[in-house]
Image: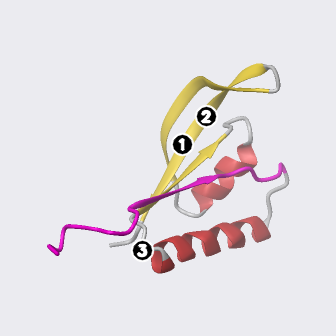
Amino acid sequence: MAAHQRTLPCRGWIHAQFSILANRHHEEALLAVNDFGFKQMQLHSIEAHINPANAASAAILESTGYVREAYFKEDYFFKGKFLDTAIYSLLKDS
């Protein structure tokens, strides 16, 4: 098999929803998920979808190296209204 061919998934996806009072435990949990994804699953990137109204989720993702890649206006319907989505990603260190 050529070096550029992969049989493992290249990207993982998580739905992040941290509480308003984000704390060190949330960050440690996300770092553990990242570590597992990159080391055990050999992912190239991890993507997180969040409700941008949840500032705690954005703060935790950004503090662990995630970068906001996209923002979708009113792209999903939840509890009777349309909500936005912010998409963050983290690439495996080279």
Q: Label 1 belongs to which residue? A: 87
The residue located at (52%, 71%) in the rendering is: 37
Task: Indicate the position of residue 49 as horizontal and vertical percent values.
Answer: 60, 45
Image quarter of residue 72: top right
The numbered disc on residue 22 is none
Q: In the shown orientation, is residue 3 left or right of residue 70?
A: left
Q: What is the secondary structure assignment of the residue under circle 3?
A: loop
The residue furthest left is: 2
Q: Earlier in the sequence, mark 3 or mark 2?
A: 3
Magenta-tinted stretch: 1-20
Left or right of 67? Residue 83 is right
Q: Which of label 1 and label 3 is nearer to you? A: 3
Callout 1 amino acid: Ile
Crowding near the residue tagged with mark 2, few <14, some 14–19, many ≥20 C-alpha atoms within 10 Å: some
Q: Is residue 19 left or right of residue 48?
A: right
- Where 76 sits versus 88, above or below? above
Residue at mark 1 to residue at mark 3: CA–CA distance: 21 Å
How far apart in space, not on screen, are marks 2 and 1 (Cα)? Answer: 6 Å
Q: Main secondary structure of the magenta part?
A: loop
Which structural element holds mark 2? strand
Residue to which mark 2 is pinned: 85
Q: Which mark is residue 42?
A: 3
Q: What type is the residue that disc 2 sits on?
A: Thr
